[in-house]
Amino acid sequence: MMNPAKKAARVLFKNATVVEPESGKQRQSDVVVEEGRLKGIEQVATDGFDGEVVDVAGMILCPGLIDMHVHLREPGREDEETVLTGCQAAMAGGFVSVCPMPNTDPATDKAEIVTYLKKQAQDLLVDVFPIAAVTVGRSGEELTEMGDLVKAGAVAFSDDGDPVASADRMRRALEYASMFDVAIINHCEDKSLSKYGVMNESAVSTRLGLPGIPGISEDVMVARDIQVARFTGGRLHIAHISTANSVALVREAKQQGVRVTCEVMPHHFVLTDESVKTYDSNFKMNPPLRTATDVEAMLAGLQDGTIDVIATDHAPHAIEEKQVEFNAAPFGIVGLETALGLVLKHLIEPGVLSLPQALAKMSNAPADILNVQRGRLKIGSEASITIFDPEAEWRVDKKKFMSKSKNTPFDGWQLRGRVKALYNKGRLWIA
Amino acid sequence: MQFSRKHLLGLEGFSKEEILYILDTAKSFREVLSRPIPKVPTLRGKTIVNLFFEASTRTRISFELAEKRLSADSVNFAVSTSSVKKGETLRDTARNIEAMKIDMVVMRHSAAGAPHFLSQCVDAHIINAGDGQHEHPTQGLLDLMTLQEKFGDLSGLNVVVVGDIAHSRVARSNIYGLQALGAKVGLCGPATFIPYQAEHWGVEIFNKIDEAIEWANVLNVLRIQLERQQGGMFSTTREYFNLFGITRQRIESAGKDITILHPGPINRGVEIESELADSDYALILQQVTNGVAIRMAVLYLFSGLSSDNSSESDA
């Protein structure tokens, strides 16, 4: 069971190690919240403070983390996850904001569904910032009522799970969305190339006899979308980038001034397709785990800023659907509760990124892509804070997940960094 | 030798000693098959389920015969009569069957890795009778046995597998088995049929059949599945035969002894000239006979009996 979050207008976080990812500034200080807003980052005496005092000595205090790519399965598959359980999983993983993708049933293609999702989260600490569908029913045909959807609270558009297959539809979506200054997030996969593939096409798929998803199925659509974004001037965000070639394409496009950003998932910078060799469907996701060369490219892209964001693609699946032969299992793994631990253990500990660099990719960078007032410790703004112990070592135990689903490849892994407290939407949660 | 493996999921990772031990055991069972009453009590009291999720005539009959020759009790479970059509998962199907107290499962499935998955769900011994495009270990073993009968030691032998390597479980089991015994493996077929990064297997790759024949002592000719044509994997069977068909003229112009294997069923006139398939070059029917002996050996060795130190020497 999880401690409940409670309303707390006035909070004093004592002795924090405050990290402001955007500037890279890191200092010892207290942090004060008043009326749900960030009042100050300064030494404040405990005596006489009229409110909750939380001692966070030795802890990192940073802007509330944002996961801009999750699947909450509500509406439609509440047996796998709900807004409530997904938000609890987010909290356990240190996230105060999540962006659910629209591949629900029904799809998030109407303002009422955005309103419904936001209502489901209104009494929770976690913000739910829905991403709405680009096309009605995610069918790739008619554009959704983007104006109405943005007004209701949609922060971006995507047909995630499926690509926007038609180049013309992608063009029109980028043009139309630019009226509202929102990004189109594309799941880049040319399905004529990936076909019935279930894992990366490589020496490993050849050995295992599993149908492959070639890296080019991603690359050709990334290349196409970059050209369309260049032509339209629209804002393009590449979801779950996974190949070395795609990273190179984005790097080049950014140098040329194309408005393109991208995100990577922890499994794509930690695991390779070698893991599939036991035919365990917890290593099956789309895009699939790639090769060691691709993993190196992810790390390089994270370092040089080509990759803007770290997100999870949290994809809960019922155990009976995953516990089948590899071909028949659905794509996807849960990620909210392991992402921060993987980042600390596999990016920060080996020195791939500094702590502020990594946290920036989970706070101010996604906030800017989504245009949400989060991701920074800004005096006077609504306070949104994540606090974690960067040294705590822990072992992943999927049975303890808050998520309804347990489909993780990281069960039993030794990770680092435990969430201690969160503050968001005027609510305080102590782990 | 103690045979300690519980399942036969594939030949990948098998040592030379293990494979030779299976082949030796099969040799003694092959002798049984030539007796007036070709039957031994080796697996009396053992119950084997033939779990075939994919249509198969030859492999299923070969396993069934092997089971009968070993006096096992066996039942067949075929997909058309099964609950799979009712949406039951593979795991549930297998656990239900296992609850009926069975010892072994011989499994054919269209998904690569399905027997590996099953081996994690049930306690019974699993024999892979072909999983998707992954492995067909008993076919690999019977090919090895047939070559061993002709050549003895296989080390240094050049064997080319010809055809649709990408979609072939026979090819993969051949590669692992042949390499374990020291043979060199070549792959020959249209570029679309050679799987991505096949060179990682440490094999020779040929796109010209005459070069492959020149290099080879043995050609293992795979069946061409005609539905691949619609998938854009090759153009026409006519062109395939022109470019890759094994003909007497091609064999004879190489001017050396060439042995031909084929896992069947043959598409005469597509991958091989009809007359050549019936010639002395081909060991195709010997493969079929050896198939029963190999499956007897496999059923015996993987039943757990051989590691009991009991002297099942009536084999």
Image (tube, coloured by chain):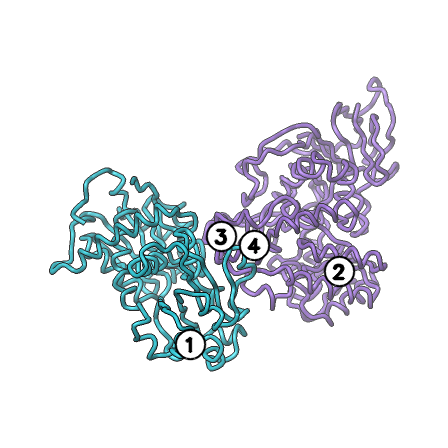
Chain colours: A purple, B cyan
Q: CA distance from mark 3 to mark 4?
A: 10 Å
* Image quarter (top left, top right, bottom left or bottom right) of the N terminus of chain A: top right
Tag 2: residue type?
Answer: Ile
The mark lying in front, picked from 4 and 2, is 4
B234 displayed left or right of B121: right
Tag 1: residue type?
Answer: Ser
* Image quarter (top left, top right, bottom left or bottom right) of the C terminus of chain A: top right
Please rate how many residues cluster around mark 3, counting C-alpha atoms within 10 Å: few if below 14, some from 14 to 19, many from 20: few
- Give the farthest residue toward the bottom: B238
Residue A277 image offset from top left, x and y in percent: 50, 49
Which one is earlier in the sequence, the residue at label 2 or at label 3? 2
* Above or below: residue B173 compared with residue B220: above
Task: Write down the residue under mark 2.
Answer: A184
Q: CA distance from mark 4 to mark 2?
A: 22 Å
Tags 4 and 1 in contact by the CB under 8 Å rule? no
* Chain to which mark 2 belongs: A
Residue B225 image offset from top left, x and y in percent: 43, 72
Given residues B105 and A83, the one toward you in this image is: B105
The mark lying in front, picked from 2 and 1, is 1
Tag 3: residue type?
Answer: Glu
Please rate how many residues cluster around mark 1, counting C-alpha atoms within 10 Å: few if below 14, some from 14 to 19, many from 20: few
Residue at x 33%, y 41% (from the top left corner): B4
Which one is earlier in the sequence, the residue at label 4 or at label 2? 2
Residue at x 82%, y 56% (from the top left corner): A254
Task: Write down the residue under mark 3.
Answer: A321
Residue at x 18%, y 45% (from the top left corner): B313
Residue A331 has which mark? 4
Given residues B95 and A88, the one toward you in this image is: B95
A170 displayed left or right of A230: left
